[in-house]
């Protein structure tokens, strides 16, 4: 398998962390969505990352949530330690979508600031509000949960998404928010970042010119 995309993307990173957690061998192609768009296009016409190219070199999965579903299926329910079922499974999907949404809006805000000569204030304010109020909700959710990670003492896909989203927005948009407003999320992310799978799959943020 080949994982395309740089680890400063919160979505590529969540897939890289899952691959390592599951002990699946993969090649990493740290291609930039802008600088290496032609290379990515040979596998994925959307030119988006993460893209996961299977060993036949023709089957390509994209969208991090779909890729994680494929990986969970590949390793099987006994080994899919990041997956949850039942109510926890539904909550994991909900929390992952909220955290992924924060990351999405963070990416939109970075693109708006960097790719346009003049950022559109209406869009910037909307993204800022969406990020801040979703982090408020995630903060409340994390505070209500007394376990080490979101569901129990084992890491889940939702823990990973929350951490990679936080890592991305707090680095790429460092001056945009007062980050101490979300202490439980920050503490959660710091604990996850200390784990080997997270430190092995990390890259400092580079602007979209380099990504
Ligand atoms: N929903 C997607 C989001 C992926 C995403 O936003 N990727 C960005 C990099 S962080 C990208 O490919 N940007 C280039 C583009 O959209 O053209 C996922 O979960 O994989």
Image: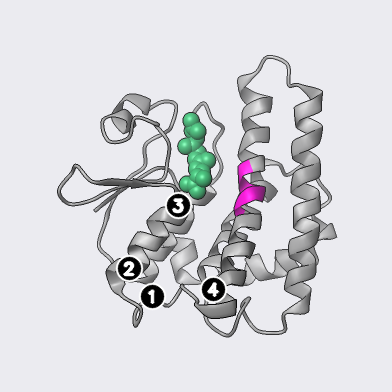
Q: Are marks 4 and 2 in contact (CB under 8 Å)?
A: no
Residue 102 placement (x, y as % from top left): 67, 49
Q: Which residue is mark 2?
A: 73
Q: Are marks 2 and 1 in contact (CB under 8 Å)?
A: yes
Q: Which residue is mark 3?
A: 64
In the picture as drawn, the residue positioned furthest to the left comes out as 56
Q: CA distance from mark 2 to mark 3?
A: 14 Å
Q: CA distance from mark 1 to mark 4?
A: 12 Å
Residue at 44 percent across and 67 percent down: it is 197
Q: Residues within 10 Å of mark 2 (few under 14, many from 20)?
A: few
In the depicted view, which residue is nearer to us: 137 or 88? 88
- Asked whether mark 3 lies closer than 8 Å to ligand 1, one says yes
- Say if 144 sits above or below 92 in the image: below
Q: Would you say residue 102 sits in the magenta stretch?
A: yes
Q: Secondary structure at mark 4?
A: helix
Q: Which residues are magenta?
A: 100-104
Residue 207 placement (x, y as % from top left): 56, 32
Q: Of marks 2 and 3, which one's residue comes earlier in the chain? A: 3
- Asked whether mark 1 lies closer than 8 Å to ligand 1, one says no
């Amino acid at each position: 398998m080949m994982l395309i995309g740089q680890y400063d993307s919160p979505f590529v990173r969540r897939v890289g962390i899952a691959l390592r957690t599951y002990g699946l061998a993969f090649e990493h192609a740290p291609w930039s969505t802008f600088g290496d768009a032609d290379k990515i296009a040979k596998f994925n016409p959307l030119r988006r990352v993460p893209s996961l190219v299977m060993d036949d070199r023709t089957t390509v999965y994209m969208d991090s949530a779909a890729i994680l579903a494929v990986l969970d299926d590949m390793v099987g329910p006994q080994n899919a330690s990041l997956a949850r079922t039942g109510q926890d499974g539904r909550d994991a999907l909900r929390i992952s979508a909220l955290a992924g949404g924060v990351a999405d809006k963070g990416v939109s805000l970075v693109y708006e600031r960097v790719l346009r000569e003049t950022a559109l204030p209406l869009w910037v304010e909307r993204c800022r509000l969406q990020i801040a109020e979703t982090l408020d909700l995630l903060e409340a959710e994390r505070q209500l949960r007394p376990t080490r990670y979101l569901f129990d003492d084992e890491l889940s896909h939702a823990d990973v998404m929350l951490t990679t989203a936080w890592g991305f927005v707090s680095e790429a948009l460092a001056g945009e928010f007062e980050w101490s407003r979300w202490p439980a999320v920050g503490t959660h992310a710091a604990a996850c970042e200390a784990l080997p799978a997270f430190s092995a799959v990390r890259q400092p943020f580079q602007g979209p010119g380099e990504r």
